[in-house]
Image (tube, rainbow, N blue to C red):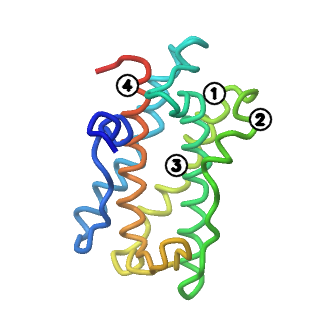
Amino acid sequence: MSEDIEKLRYPIGRFNFPETAGPGEAKKWISEIETLPQKLVEIIEPLNEDKLNARYREDGWTVRQIVHHLVDSHINSYVRFKLALTEDIPTIKPYREDRWADLPDNDVTPVRVSLDLLTNLHTRWTDMLKALSWQDLQKEFYHPENKRNIKLAQNLALYAWHGKHHLAHIKLAVGIK
């Protein structure tokens, strides 16, 4: 992959699972998850249809698809947290995010619906996360595509990164520095 395409695909860099982290990092990641919806609303609400249909790179998703994808992805993560907290290393169900992004509801559902859903989801999610102990965040689920157990603390880091990753895509698509 060329360096230019790499920078467009991963404007904040690729994610690497943290092998070591502590409660301080978890608190920071929870805060990033908690504040994502408001940051997203501030960027998305003023956009017109042309901007919502803008892409951050050729063959990349539109801003509209990114907003809907964030909800799809974060709902899946929220469920994975609940499964890992209530079962012994459950095997999660992967999903085809590329196919989900191409479903027709992404074209007809107003982005406001996903912004509201993401805001409410993140309220529930962060309320739960703030109530967890560091020990709780050591619980795991098994990801069959990655063929590895993933600790909730690692998944927390992933989704803090995921929100920032897609905010950066949206900013690229609409020309915000």
- Whole-angstrom CA distance, mark 4 to mark 3, is 24 Å
The spot of residue 76 in percent (x, y) is 60, 59
> Relative to the observer, which residue lies in front, 123 or 33?
33
**Marks 1 and 4: CB-CB under 8 Å?**
no
- Residue at 56%, 88% in the rendered image: 88
Q: Amino acid at mark 3?
A: His
Please tell me whether mark 3 sits on a helix, a strand or a loop: helix
**What residue is disc 4 on?**
172
**What residue is disc 3 on?**
122
**Mark closer to the observer (1, 4):** 4
Q: How many marks?
A: 4
Q: Amino acid at mark 1?
A: Arg
Q: Residues within 10 Å of mark 4 (few under 14, many from 20)?
A: some
**Marks 4 and 3: CB-CB under 8 Å?**
no
Picture quarter with the N terminus:
top left
- Whole-angstrom CA distance, mark 4 to mark 2, is 24 Å
**Mark closer to the observer (1, 2):** 2
**Mark 3 vs 1, N-terminal side:** 1
**What residue is disc 2 on?**
104
User: Against 12, is 59 above or below?
Assistant: above
> Relative to the observer, which residue lies in front, 105 or 46?
105
The spot of residue 118 in percent (x, y) is 57, 42
